[in-house]
Image (cartoon, rainbow, N blue to C red):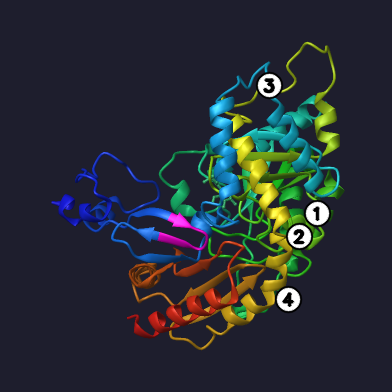
Amino acid sequence: MVQELIHPQSTGASREDLEAFWMPFTANRQFKANPRLFVSAKDMYFTTEDGRQVLDGTAGLWCVNAGHCRPKIVEAIQQQVATLDYAPAFQMGHPGAFQLADRLAKLAPGDLNHVFFVNSGSEAVDTALKIAIAYHRVRGEGTRQRLIGRERGYHGVGFGGISVGGIGTNRKFFGSLLTGVDHLPHTHSLEHNAFSRQQPAWGAHLADELERLVALHDPSNIAAVIVEPVAGSTGVLIPPQGYLERLRSICDKHGILLIFDEVITGFGRLGTGFAADYFGVMPDMITVAKGISNGTVPMGAVFVRDGIYDAFMHGTENAIELFHGYTYSGHPVACAAAMATLDVYEEEGLFHYARELSGYWEEAMHSFKGAPHVIDVRSLGLVAGIELESLPGKPTARAFECFLRCYQQGLLIRTTGDTIALSPPLIIQKHQIDQLVELLTQILHELP
Ligand SMILES: Cc1ncc(COP(=O)(O)O)c(C=O)c1O
């Protein structure tokens, strides 16, 4: 039975049946036949159930940017839950949510001065899409309902997110999705850009496809364009030079809102607060989650520019302006976790540290050029994608085998398709980068 494969001696726990938990985005039967369980974590390392240390090459799932179990964050959560465990989110408040929103607004670029709290990246995306459509409506342009995403985009798993998203497997089982959605082409090209350093030179013209969609649908029907500034989950795709700037200017020309989904890039991943800062391109909304609370307590948010928020603040004062929100929007424990997380980022200068380290990281990542199976390396800030040639007739199998071997030998990587995605906590040190490269290189040499 699958139960035999758990190692109860290491945790002292009784043998548990693994069947009840339907695991997300996981091959359940394969996993349960040979489970991989973490029981604790500290700074850069997880500890497995059988007592092994595993270097975290992925900040959990792109979220533990300050490293694991940081005392300041742990204490803030403990204190908050013992003081005010919950306060109703509708028609009531608590000081922590206002303080956090104010602090986040100061961190965000430009006039992204208003913050709508949610509990995940998926909720942030669906919230932003709804705000975009409602914004045009309250301004008297209610025909602007169409949403434009991008092929290979990942915007979470809500119906809005999978509709604007562009990953076929995430869409194909779920019916007709939202109507009125179109997609830009993705920007990945091995032919033109393989092994580019930082932003690839080829591909800015792909933003002009937006003009084609505008001509097709007419601007009066388009509410918003949503893209990840650096696409993460689809395999780390870095925007070509000039691409985001071009999207911005086409959106401006036609009165279309531009939403950056920064669930992965927010909070220091590129060595700046947000990718919008890194690229110097100002969106109308930014969606975040993950690093906002260092992965400790679920939280997400949508940053909104003044003009959008102001457009809703009309009419009678006792009328609810936006019929949207979650029971746990601005949850006190999540707010405390996020406040303490921002303290750690700030006190330790982690965004700056990540920026300083990014050159070393880039060299290290590009050392995979020439390693067996590697057909591309893409790296920016402290994120990298290492694309492997697929095993003939078995897409994803080679990268997954690499993931399993890394885990067995003490390194957590993430794979998507046949790309290895690396995004370590921002506290990673040079010797740990070296350790990661050494182990991964060795495993690439051993892979079928
Ligand atoms: C860009 C982007 N948007 C949205 C999401 C969804 O976030 P969540 O899993 O918290 O719903 C993710 C998750 O990886 C993401 O990378």
- In the image, residue 334 above or below residue 83: below
Beta carbon of the mark 3 residue lies under 8 A of ligand 1 = no
Q: Nearer the viewer, mark 3 or mark 4?
A: 3
Between the residue at mark 1 and the residue at mark 3, the CA separation in whole angstroms equals: 36 Å
Occupied quadrant, residue 364? bottom right
Q: Are marks 4 and 2 in contact (CB under 8 Å)?
A: no
Which is more toward the observer, 28 or 158?
28
Looking at the rendered structure, which numbered label has been put on residue 201?
Answer: 4
Question: Which numbered disc, 1 or 3, marks the residue closer to the eye?
Answer: 3
Magenta extent:
41-46
Q: Label 2: which residue?
A: 244
Would you identify the image quadrant in which residue 181 lies? top right
The overriding secondary structure of the stretch rendered in magenta is strand
Q: Which residue is mark 1?
A: 248
Mark 3–mark 4 CB contact (< 8 Å): no
Badge 1 amino acid? Arg
Tell me the CA gap for discs 4 and 2: 13 Å
Mark pair 2, 3: CA separation: 37 Å
- Which kind of residue does numbered mark 2 sit on? Leu
